[in-house]
Amino acid sequence: MVRADLAAAGVRLNAYAEALLDRPEFGTESPEPQTVEVVLRSVSELGLTDGGTLPEVFAAAASAGLRLCPLTTGPALRLALLDQESAPDSVLSTGRAPTGSIHVASAPVSEDHEVPKGFYLRVIDGVPWLRGYRCDDVHVHAPDVVFAFARHSAPVTAHSTSGNPVGAAMDDLEDFVPSANQRVDPDVYEIENRAMDREQTLWTELRRQSDWRDRVILDLGCGSGYWLPHYGDAQQVIGVEPDPTLIAFAEQRPGEAVVLRGSAEHIPLADASVDVVHARFAYFFPHPRFDPSAGLREVGRVLREGGTLVVIDNDTETGEFAELLRRSAAAAAQGQDTYARQWWASQGADTTEVMSSWTFDTREDLEAVLHLEFPVELADSWLADHPETTALTYGYLVHRWTTPSGASA
């Protein structure tokens, strides 16, 4: 249907656009209709006056309250803008965006830079074109390049704790450590998330600790945003993530979550603006060589009176997953239970043990996730000792910290 509509309107396609239209999003069945409010912003209007890479552009847009469009927006916007002004020339130059073009900002469909990133619109000599484009994460888009973004429907009050723009460069977030799993292979990490806590034991405990129903919840270090749609009964859902690559994925999750760029020590929200904060395997790893007090103070700043921080961490003592953690040097560097429990107790928090599981659909899924999370030798050794299993027991520590005033701890 999409190709037929484009052809009927006289829209021409390049090979990259053809490749994108072959994706499942444009299947034979009509997709569920979506209403997207589109706004146009040049790279310089996003605060990147010297231009920016695609991750920088997407991060600046997220900080400005804009979100990425669904991939299907490209053809729809092309049909809606048939009266787009003709480009001043028909030149296509390697290394720069074509003049007069509008790039539709959408999450990259692949980390392979040979795969088209998305669509752009251009009119040449009165003929409307829908084109796909390619670029890598170091290509700098000029200040005058125009992108189409979707506007958030939920209000968010942005705030910079340092006086710097909320969309500052990634290097300005000193507490940012790139993810060693989901950034490396987001597809496998998605499998990992789907395997987690299928019996809902942890989820039930999280709601018991601090129910987010009809309240404002912040997923701090939300990563690719897998858990954002699960808070659907909240009044408002906000995700904060320092990595622009993962923000691009989080923006595409269903629901009305607002995703902003920030970190535990630099939360881009106003004082006393949040009821519940969840931090799942993010930043809060107390260790003799790392004190997360700065992040705790920042969380205290944004929490309202009686607000609650709930930190989900691994139990390194109980369960089959704990066996793997104890044998992994990288995991051990995130801290051991005794120190973490003592640190949280010193902050006035309480800790609850929760036993759940990882349950995978196939053995291949389990193998892929273990190889993502652990050294090959360790993963293979464990798999050899458990030749038939597609599940393992998984213990969590849930740390609950409440501030009576919402002010800094």
Image (cartoon, rainbow, N blue to C red):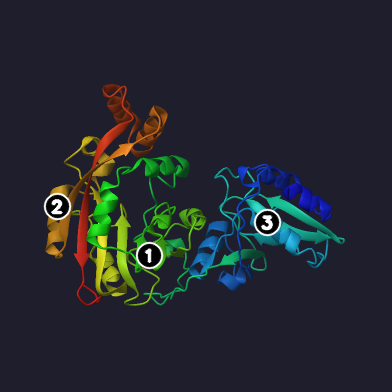
Mark 1 neighbour class, 10 Å CA radius: few under 14, some 14 to 19, many 20 or more: some
Q: Nearer the viewer, mark 2 or mark 1?
A: 1
| Quarter-of-image position of residue 99 | bottom right
Dot 2 falls on a residue whose secondary structure is helix
Res 150 label? none
Where does label 2 land, which residue? 339
Where does label 3 land, which residue? 74
Q: Nearer the viewer, mark 1 or mark 3?
A: 1
Lower sequence index among marks 1 and 3: 3
The extreme right residue here reads 125
Alpha carbon separation for disc pair 1 and 3: 31 Å
Lower sequence index among marks 2 and 1: 1
Mark 3 neighbour class, 10 Å CA radius: few under 14, some 14 to 19, many 20 or more: many
Q: Nearer the viewer, mark 3 or mark 2?
A: 3
Where does label 1 land, which residue? 234
- For this view, does 366 lie left or right of residue 319? right
Q: Is residue 196 visible?
A: yes
Residue 306: % across, % down: 23, 73
Quarter of the picture containing the C terminus is: bottom left
Residue 20: % across, % down: 67, 46
For the image, the number of numbered tags is 3
Q: Are marks 2 and 1 in contact (CB under 8 Å)?
A: no
Mark 2 neighbour class, 10 Å CA radius: few under 14, some 14 to 19, many 20 or more: some
Q: Identify the residue shown where x is 47% and y is 56%.
A: 250
Residue 204: % across, % down: 27, 52
| Residue 126, above or below 387 | below
Q: Are marks 3 and 2 in contact (CB under 8 Å)?
A: no
| Residue 197, above or below 212 | above
| Residue 241, above or below 320 | below
- For this view, does 274 lie left or right of residue 255? left
Q: Are marks 1 and 3 in contact (CB under 8 Å)?
A: no
